[in-house]
Image (tube, rainbow, N blue to C red):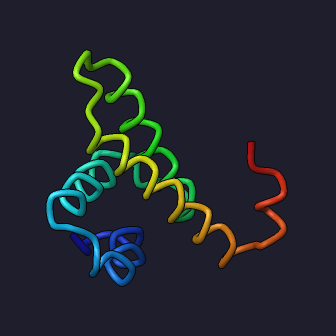
Amino acid sequence: MNDTPVEQWLVARVAGVPPGLRARMASAVNAAPQVGEPDVVLRAAADALLAEATRCECRDAQALLAADALITYACEAMAERNVRGLAGLS
């Protein structure tokens, strides 16, 4: 993970994340449309993971954890770009 600008932004922050979770996050980021600022791409990746987790009858805990982490990183990316933008999150 670190070919796209979003992956480069993210790789600097995930060193302490367990390898399996990090791989799941990377896969979701790679599959997301690489359009827009990092927070937009990370949010799209998190939304896809959340949809995947809710479709699966097994309630994939790793997908939920990865989605949660990506939403957190999306908020961090938005705050770096425009801290006032956080007020509009819903």
Left or right placement of residue 39 versus residue 21 in this view: right
Q: Where is residue 18 in the image (x, y as percent from the top left)?
A: 21, 67
Left or right placement of residue 4 versus residue 73 in this view: left
User: Does 26 sit above or below residue 33?
Assistant: below
Q: Quadrant of the N terminus?
A: bottom left
User: Does 88 sit above or below residue 6?
Assistant: above
| Residue at image coords 18%, 59% | 23
Depth check, front residue: 65 or 1: 65
| Residue at image coords 50%, 65% | 73
Q: In which quarter of the image is the C terminus?
A: top right
Examine the image and state in which quarter residue 49 appears. top left
Q: Position of residue 29 (x, y in %)?
A: 33, 54
User: Does 47 sit above or below residue 82?
Assistant: above
Left or right placement of residue 19 versus residue 32 in this view: left
Depth check, front residue: 6 or 18: 18
Examine the image and state in which quarter residue 36 appears. bottom right
Left or right placement of residue 80 versus residue 8 in this view: right
| Residue at image coords 41%, 34% | 50
Depth check, front residue: 82 or 90: 90
Q: Where is residue 15 in the image (x, y as percent from the top left)?
A: 27, 81
Q: Where is residue 43 in the image (x, y as percent from the top left)?
A: 52, 49
User: Does 6 sit above or below residue 21?
Assistant: below
